[in-house]
Amino acid sequence: MSRLASWMCVVWSLTFIGLGCTPPPAPPAAAPPPAAEPPPPAAPIKAEAGVGKQGQSLKNEGAVGRFFAQPAITLFTVKQRVVFEIQIPQAMNLYQASNGYKPKSHDEFMTHIIKANNIALPILPEGQVYKYHPDEGVLYVHPAKE
């Protein structure tokens, strides 16, 4: 038993010496302060997942914060994808099949596609608005001043 005890003392001593010889890790660099909100786009962009206000502040999290924020980011992204990639195209297809044409104005789009189908468009950051482009049949996000 004394041999075993002496070997354990040697192993423990080497372990503690080995751990004590390395310099302590440097403290993590201070992360830059997160931006409150991204500035509104200068040009119109197609309305798609990621344009909504929800979850944008979570994207600026550091590594550990990102670990905890990622489920929420994913939830908000999926909700927006459902609206822009499933609900609106389905409602547009039904409208076009019923009427033979796509909505001809922004008001017609908002009334017959969004309101009639109870589609909840994601809330946009301040300074941005939705605008339907009837020539393309696509919803865009524009700066509010246009």
Image (tube, rainbow, N blue to C red):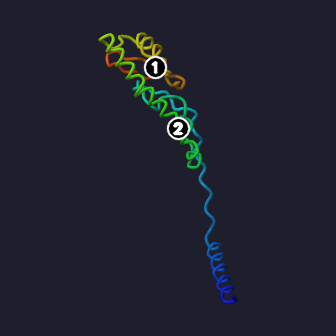
Which residue is drawn at the image coordinates 62% and 68% (left, top)?
Answer: 23
Q: Is residue 130 above or below residue 60?
A: above
- State the residue at coordinates (68%, 87%): 6
Q: Position of residue 39 (x, y in %)?
A: 51, 30
- Residue 66 location (% of width, % of height): 56, 45
Q: Which quadrant holds the N terminus?
A: bottom right
Residue 2 image label: none
- Quadrant location of residue 61? top right
Q: Nearer the viewer, mark 1 or mark 2?
A: 2
Picture coordinates of residue 110, whole percent (x, y): 44, 14
Q: Classify 138 as above or below 28.
A: above
**N-terminal label among 1 and 2:** 2
**Location of residue 144 in the rendering, given as x and y in whole percent from the top left corner:** 49, 19
Label 2: how many Cα within 10 Å (few below 14, some 14–19, many 20+): some
Number of numbered markers: 2
From the image, tell me which residue sits under label 1.
130
Q: Is residue 22 left or right of residue 109?
A: right
Residue at 65 percent of width and 77 percent of height: 17
For label 1, count other residues whose C-alpha is less than 10 Å away and answer few (under 14), some (14-19) or many (20+): many
Q: Quadrant of the C terminus?
A: top left
As drawn, the residue found furthest toward the left would be 100
Mark 1 → mark 2, Cα distance in angstroms? 22 Å
Q: Secondary structure at mark 2?
A: helix
- Tag 2: residue type? Ile
As drawn, the label of residue 73 is: 2
Residue type of the residue flagged with mark 1: Tyr
- Secondary structure of the residue carrying tag 1 is strand
> In which image quadrant can residue 47 be found?
top left
